[in-house]
């Protein structure tokens, strides 16, 4: 089967300090309706930090595959290209990575009260959180950088 890559030439990927395994591009932040839509590019076979989604969300795998790992590192699920999955808030903490090829995944976060992601250490203690205000600040910086280009 022939594999085709998503054409992302018109996307200016951004990095979040301390998260070398991913790049992101924010499409929308809507505080009034409690939603955030962000495209995430995962480096092949490099897990992002243990985290928990604090808001419900949907994922759509645009390219590659998204691998979900339990806190102990065992593989829980593989979401192939074209997968659309609806998940609730406060599920099991997990890590994620692409498979052997770069993955691009749309995350549509919904019903956000304040928190979106809570990152945890190996003992599952909170290390840092990202809320809607944090994502709004990243979105504003993204728009400002685009104006400068």
Image (cartoon, grey):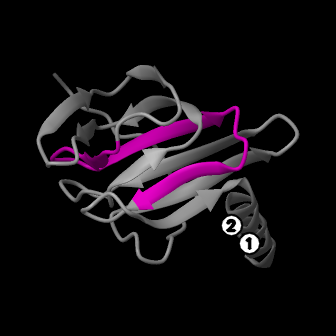
* Other-residue count near label 1 (Cα within 10 Å), few / some / many at <14 / 14–19 / ≥20: few
Look at 24% across and 63% down and name the residue there.
122
Residue 13 can be seen in this image? no
User: Looking at the picture, how far across and down is residue 128, in whole percent?
Assistant: 50, 68
Residue 16 can be seen in this image? yes
Quadrant of the rendered structure where residue 70 is?
top left
Q: Secondary structure at mark 2?
A: helix
* Other-residue count near label 2 (Cα within 10 Å), few / some / many at <14 / 14–19 / ≥20: some
Look at 19% across and 32% down and name the residue there.
76
Horizontally, residue 21 falls left or right of residue 135, namely: left
Look at 24% across and 31% down and name the residue there.
3
Residue with the mark numbered 1: 141
| Quadrant including the C terminus | bottom right
Q: Which residues are magenta?
A: 93-119
User: Looking at the picture, how far across and down is residue 136, in whole percent?
Assistant: 75, 60
Quadrant of the rendered structure where residue 6 is?
top left
141 vs 17, nearest the viewer: 17
User: Looking at the picture, how far across and down is residue 73, in whole percent?
Assistant: 14, 48
Residue with the mark numbered 2: 138
User: Looking at the picture, how far across and down is residue 104, in whole percent?
Assistant: 41, 44
Asked if the residue under mark 1 is in contact with the one under mark 2, i.e. CB atoms within 8 Å, the reply is yes
Residue 80, disc: none
């Amino acid at each position: 089967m022939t594999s085709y890559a998503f054409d992302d030439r018109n996307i200016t990927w951004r990095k979040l300090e301390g998260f070398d395994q991913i790049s992101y591009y924010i499409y929308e932040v809507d505080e009034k309706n409690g939603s955030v839509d962000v495209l995430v590019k995962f480096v092949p076979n490099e897990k992002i930090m243990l985290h928990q989604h604090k808001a419900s969300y949907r994922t759509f795998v645009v390219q590659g595959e998204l691998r979900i790992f339990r806190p102990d590192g065992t593989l829980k699920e593989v979401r192939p290209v074209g997968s659309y999955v609806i998940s609730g808030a406060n599920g099991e903490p997990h890590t994620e990575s692409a498979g052997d090829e770069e993955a691009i995944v749309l995350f549509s976060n919904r019903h956000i009260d304040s928190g979106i992601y809570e990152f945890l250490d190996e003992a599952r203690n909170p290390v840092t959180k990202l809320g809607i205000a944090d994502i709004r600040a990243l979105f504003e910086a993204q728009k400002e950088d685009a104006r400068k280009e």
